[in-house]
Image (spheres, rainbow, N blue to C red):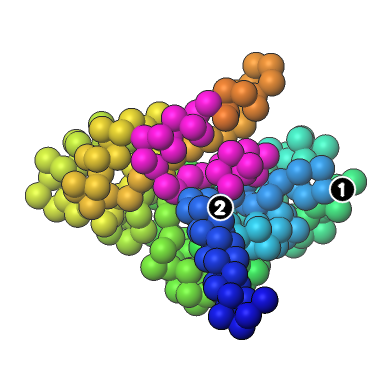
Amino acid sequence: MSGMRRTSVLLIFLLYNLTVYCQSNSHRLIAHRGGVVDSLRGENSLEALQEAGKRGYYMIEVDVRLTRDSILVTHHDANLKRTFGIDTSLSAMTWNELSRLKNNNGYRILSFEDVLKAARGHLQIMIDLKIRGDHPAIFNRMIDLLKKYDLYQQALMIGTDESTQFFTGKIKLSCTRAQLEENMKKKSFNPAHYYLFSGDISAADVEWTKKHNILTVGVVNAWSFKDGDGMAPAKAQAQRLIKAGVTCFQIDSMFEPFFR
């Protein structure tokens, strides 16, 4: 084979692989429950976070709570019974007490700072805020930590009613389309302050958000498919969202093949 022909074949091979790579990575994925969660890796665990980074996820979603001594931690449930067999509220325990807990799978609760430290440089952060009430000092500390680990600019939040006023304009907040339309009536409205977040987004919704420069995030979460085998309806939902033009998704990692 001549040198020119070999070069042409090599270029075609490289272009083909680049096309396959781009197609398989055309969606930005946000890993629900703190990363890639499976039989080997628990939700909101360091192992789940690390695996999400290896697989090229754009962001992880973490559940943020507050200990009795006001330390920010990541854990889904308010109660510790499901994870550790202790019928106690997380908020009733100090960080020192919580940090000693370890279940049969080796899972330990992580501090919010530990998660940010591990994510820095390869994963962005979506916060599912599970702290009730309005706590400006605590919320400011959360922002300071995000800034410390260079994760503030791209951060997203699923907030609470009590925290909305504080975080508006500081971190992008999740909204339904109805909420976005209501917010648009306010003189202070800025599309950069919000994102559309839903499992039911139409092509018209995508066109509308593009027109108004609003980020759109589709959702495919396992909790939505509790009855029977959730894979088929989850795949159908993923396909509807992709067909509608959504390109960023928050998903449970079991549904990852639908987007690759």
What residue is shown with label 1? 105
The structure residue drawn at horizontal position 48% and vertical position 69%, both measured from the top left corner, is: 151
Most extreme residue toward the left is: 187
Q: Is residue 181 visible?
A: yes
| Residue beneath the point at 71% across and 54% down | 48
Quadrant position of the N terminus in the picture: bottom right
Residue 127 seen in this snapshot = no
Q: Looking at the image, is 106 positioned above or below residue 89?
A: below
Label 1 or label 2, whichever comes before in sequence order: 2
Q: CA distance from mark 1 to mark 2?
A: 32 Å
Residue 138 in percent (x, y) is at 47, 61
Q: Main secondary structure of the magenta part?
A: helix
**Residue sitting nearer the eye, 253 or 41:** 253
- Up-down relation of residue 8 to residue 138 (above or below): below
Q: Residues within 10 Å of mark 1 (few under 14, many from 20)?
A: few
Q: Nearer the viewer, residue 130 or 27?
A: 27
Tell me the SS state at disc 2: helix
Residue that badge 2 annotates: 24
**Residue in the picture at 33% in, 30% down:** 202
Tag 1 near tag 2, CB within 8 Å? no
Magenta stretch in the rendered image: 236-260
Query: How far from the left and from the top, in percent, is residue 116?
Result: 58, 67
Q: What type is the residue that disc 2 sits on?
A: Ser
Q: Looking at the picture, which amino acid does disc 1 mark? A: Asn
Q: Is residue 104 left or right of residue 236?
A: right
